[in-house]
Amino acid sequence: MIWQNCRDDLRQMCKTKLVLSEALQVFTHRLAQLAPAPLTPSSHAAPAAPAAQRRREGLRMLQPGDKPEVGSILIAHPMSCIFQPDLDRAVIVIDEVHPGHVRGLVLNKPGGILMETLKPEELERAKEAGLSGLLHNRLYLGGDLMDAEDLVNHVRWLHSSDLPGAQRLAPGLHCGGEGLAQLGAARPVLGFAGWHQDQLDLELERGVWVHLRAHSAVGLLPNDGDAETLWNDLAEAVGLSSFSSFPRGPEVDQLIKQHLDEHSRWQIESILEQAREENHAHGCASGFACRDFYDLLAPLLLQRMPEIHPICGETEVGGCVYLMWSFCKPRVMCQDLFDAVAARVIPEVQSLDRCGLAMFSWNYSYINYELKEVYKVSAAEALRTERLEELTPRDLANLMGAFAKAGIRDLDLMQALSEHGCGLLRDGIDQKCYKRPMKSLAREIYEEDFSAVDGQVVSLSEMCETQLGSFADQQFLHRDFLELADEYMMKGFDQPKRDVETFLRFPQARPCQPLLDFHSAYGISMDL
């Protein structure tokens, strides 16, 4: 019953948008009722009176609206980072603030290794840098982000001495500088925490972090044995006894994680349901954003069009063709954007991969936007021998379907695609691809290419249906393709019922109907 109350409490907190600091008292009370014996506050001893007094006098708690700056100190809410061990109950000092970006170093997470246990090549670089006298120091984890290469050059050395060239982070806390090797007490920190400025502002507003500032030395570099008590000590120093007394431990943590997981699923379901209702109300396609989103996105894409690659590549994040697909699929017409995509892609059509080439013309046909130059260059590119050889069943289906839907009758293209399709069908029959739609059509040119996996997107059977439907629309006949399509489809149908339903990905849609229609249009008998 008490655990049910905990769940109800957290749900109510989220519905009313209570920040974490306000939620803490309610949830702590419930947990304390749940299991009083193991749910005890941290057993770490409080700091000695003089140290505690210095911290109380030297720290000031800021408001959520106060902007972080170099030297700002963040302490994590006891529940906010429970799924992130590197940041859970962390004390962070901000060491870099740039426009739009903030970086910080965790101060209280001693790692399990010493500098002297690094790889030999790392040790050699450390010695070359004059750091031999510091290699016995324990390596601290500075956050959940780090560069895994050249570790020594990414270690930040924290200390309390005002060395020449050192960065002053806070009173009594410096980073780097000249003469580190003579200090002996410098602390190596590897990794960092990072935020976009807006992200950190929101997290401060929601109570994920408590924002502090030190105006005198407050002992931010305790000995290794006391490092893990730093979070407790700072929370006590600024009057957050509810933080330091918050029950934590393996048993409680498991209950909290279970509770938060359940709430996250509930929240995601609520958001998705709300999005579906809003999309339906605005006439938006299921699974896509509302029209307002596209209206805001289109001008930004137009501004950035020269920087966008025509299509995704190995090193590209996105491309014009797939961006346009994102507008076409939910049927969002944006003529200026589509004109700009055509102008950007047409001169570089040969840079498209095979999927992008087929998708390029498909986009314009699907949205019913006629740009003849798109089809002209797409046909010319598809007819290149090297390009034609690499086209997959899905590519053939998209190209033939696009030209047929646009009403563009290119006999050379239809002939070439049909002959290539015959080769695909022969291979599919030889390899018995009809037995399992997810089976890959094996060709050397398709190796390590997910788009060639028969059935994942468009199987050979669907290629047959799309191509035959296009033949009927275009009044075009390729008898070899027709005969091979008949043979392939019949082999698929001549299986147990369960296998036939697997062969036909959407049996309820009668996917063999284009085959029947085609035979009927040309007066060819077919017994299915």
Image (spheres, rainbow, N blue to C red):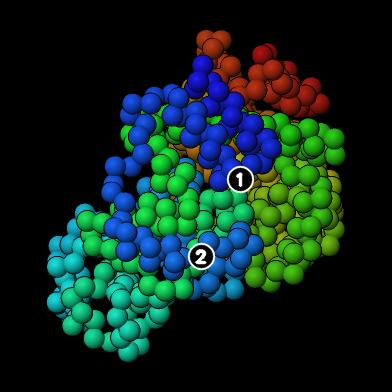
Q: Residue at x 60, y 60 (%)?
A: 63
Q: Report whether residue 297 is seen.
A: yes
In this view of the protein, which residue sits in the foreground, 259 or 304? Answer: 259
524 relative position to 258: left or right: right
Residue 99 lies, in percent from the top left, at: 59, 73
Residue 210 lies, in percent from the top left, at: 51, 56
Q: Which of labels 2 and 1 is toward the front?
A: 2
The image quarter containing residue 56 is: bottom left
The image quarter containing residue 492 is: top right
Q: Residue at x 71, y 21 (%)?
A: 509
Element carrying mark 2:
strand
Q: How many marks?
A: 2
Residue 237 lies, in percent from the top left, at: 42, 57
Q: Report whether residue 419 is seen.
A: no
Q: Amino acid under label 2?
A: Arg
137 relative position to 281: left or right: left
First in residue order: circle 2 vs circle 1? 1
From the image, tell me which residue sits under label 2.
Answer: 60
Q: CA distance from mark 2 to mark 1?
A: 20 Å
The image quarter containing residue 522 is: top right
Q: Quadrant of the C terminus?
A: top right
Q: Residue at x 69, y 64 (%)?
A: 345
Q: Amino acid under label 1?
A: Val
Using the image, tell me which numbered label, if any, was put on residue 67: none
Residue 362 lies, in percent from the top left, at: 72, 48
Q: Residue at x 66, y 41 (%)?
A: 17
From the image, tell me which residue sits under label 1.
Answer: 19
Q: Residues within 10 Å of mark 1 (few under 14, many from 20)?
A: some
Looking at the picture, does residue 478 appear above or below residue 63? above
Q: Residues within 10 Å of mark 2 (few under 14, many from 20)?
A: some
Element carrying mark 1:
loop
